[in-house]
Image (spheres, rainbow, N blue to C red):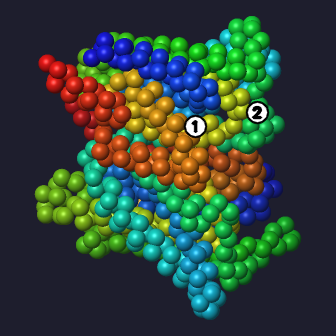
Amino acid sequence: MAEWFGDNSGLLGLALLDGLASAGLIFLVAVGLNLVFGVLRIINVAHGSLYAIGAYAAASVGIVFASMGLPAWASLPALVVAAALVGGILGPLIERLVLRRIYGQEEVLQLLVTFALFMILEDVQKLIWGVQPVQHDQAMRLLGTYDVPFAGDVVPFTAYQLFVLPGVALVVLVGLAWFLRRTLTGRVIVAVTTDREAATAMGIDARRVFLLTFTFGAMLAALGGALSSPTGAIVPGIGAQTIVLSFAVVATAGLGQTEGAALTALMIGLGRSIAVYFEPELEVVVPYIIMVAVLLVRPQGLFGSTVARRI
Amino acid sequence: MRRGETLLGLLGAAALVAAALLAPWLKFILTVALAKGIAVIGILLLLRAGQVSFGHALYVAMGAYTVAFLAPAMPDAAVLLPAGAAIATLTGLLIGLFVSRYREIFFGMLNLALSMVVYSLLEKLYDLTKGTDGIRVELPRFFGMALDRPGFEWAMFATALVLALGAGAFARLYLDSPMGQALSAIKTRETRLEFMGISARRVLLAAYVISALLGGVAGAIIGMTTRHVTPLLAYWTASGELVFIAILGGAGSVLGPFLGAVTFELVRIYAGAAVADAWQMILGGVLLAVILFAPGGLWGMIAGLLRRRAGAAS
């Protein structure tokens, strides 16, 4: 075993660098899903669509910025602008028009409403952006590559992948922890997550918190998508792929856990990239195997707390 | 209502036969719809316990892939159908022993995860499964008879119809039996069920294994009807479709799944023909409308109409 690690330490190092980037993206999506579930108690299947639309929108905004003659560095803020636009428009729209009507209904129906939204948004993407792959990688090319030494040679990694993706995830993690613990709005969100009834009784306007949280979660999903867009072509179906992966992260971490989601995303991101280097066939299976293994031992998730049974 | 349900079920079956005779091209769609309806009966049982599986397409895929793997060696529907059902049931028992400990989203997500594992394996193990290309199934015999294509399609349609009626009748009996009553108790107050000395886990496991069996039957029929089996059968959106059909048809009656499945397939075909890139949007819109404005599903609407009729007559 130790020998194997010695022989493959170089490869493991490369896998680590790849894993950090993918963990960053997974975290952004999963933490939004988690936040929305914590407050609204709805598993939002359409969260994956918001990710996909964020990616498409980022490519479009990037192209518009470039055609306006803005300098190349503007491609970085373009990603954030796209995410804010998508989350800021679609978030309130979905919450107000659809979700608001089904609070307090059966869980199955809530889940299916978001599944219906997912189906609708899936076709909206096809109608707007077509089914051909969309690519706009200016943001990634802008930052250039960085040579990582490997086995006496160098492997070029893009600086975007090495620094921007994990960096943004870290900023969001720290920012979110600060926001939830230190600001009034954040603590109100935590209060509603912990005990909605008590929070409402204390005079908290739960509807406003729902709207706010959902919009914020939508922005995080769109940000994940936007950040992923320069790293490859955007094709139909990425929303469906992303959402199952974030489900796995959320269920593995336990519900309502921000830091837990970060650790789990890291675990799953690393697990996948290690699989890519050593057993590529297993890459897609790894997250689910991790999830099943964790839930076998801890049915409430890694960081979830047990709930008292109703009698 | 019970007798009304049987009567409506038989009427519906007659209507399907009539439709298939009048428009032979419908036969294919109706066979697939009936098969999906059978799988959705299984979803209905789990819904009775308040549990949603977002992974039951796994069992449909199991049934279909069993057909695809066995067809070259034993090309007879009389062998393939029970084999598909048996493999799915065994898998269901194995997975059920594990997932019956979990409730609500954990139950849903675990089913989702396991079905995605199988989906990924079907897609990646190219040597065994031909990956996303899928496997073509040669026309099997039907109880030793070598039928031509239309003949075999009729045979599959009849098989699906008979099995659908059987599955519906069975589900009705099961839900009325103590095991079925215990299922509803899991939804309302599980702890009290256990106070009575009944293991909620076993009650759920029994329903789960039955639902896997029904999924396997559905998959085997779909495999022999479409005669092309791909990993997409196990993708999570296919599982979502099954839950979709359950709610669309209405969870209040064993006729709901078939009502939902036929509507679903017809809307899909017509919407797909009319607007190729927006059929999902149309289906999503229908689902949204049903949940927001007719929570009882199509069956709820029909039952409401019948009740009003009966009220006006008396």
In which image quadrant can residue B155 be found? top right
Q: Which residue is mark 1?
A: B115
Q: Earlier in the sequence, mark 1 or mark 2?
A: 1
Is residue B204 found left or right of A206 in the rendered image? right
Q: Nearer the viewer, residue A261 or B221?
A: B221
- Vertical order, A126 against A297 (above or below): below
Q: Nearer the viewer, residue B151 or A39?
A: B151
Is residue B98 found left or right of B234 in the rendered image? left
Is residue B194 found left or right of B127 in the rendered image? left
> Callout 2 environment at 10 Å: few (<14), some (14 to 19), or many (20+)?
some
Which chain's residue wears label 1? Answer: B
Q: What SS does tag 2 mark?
A: strand
* Residue at (60, 80) in percent of width and height: A62
Question: Would you say residue B241 is visible in this rendering?
Answer: no
* Residue at (70, 45) in percent of width and height: A282
* Residue at (36, 50) in percent of width and height: A42
Q: What SS does tag 1 mark?
A: helix
Amino acid type of the residue tagged 2 in the rendering = Ile
Report the disc number at residue B135.
2
Question: Would you say residue A200 is visible in this rendering?
Answer: yes
**Which image quarter is the C terminus of chain A in?**
top left
**Residue sitting farthest toward the top:** B144
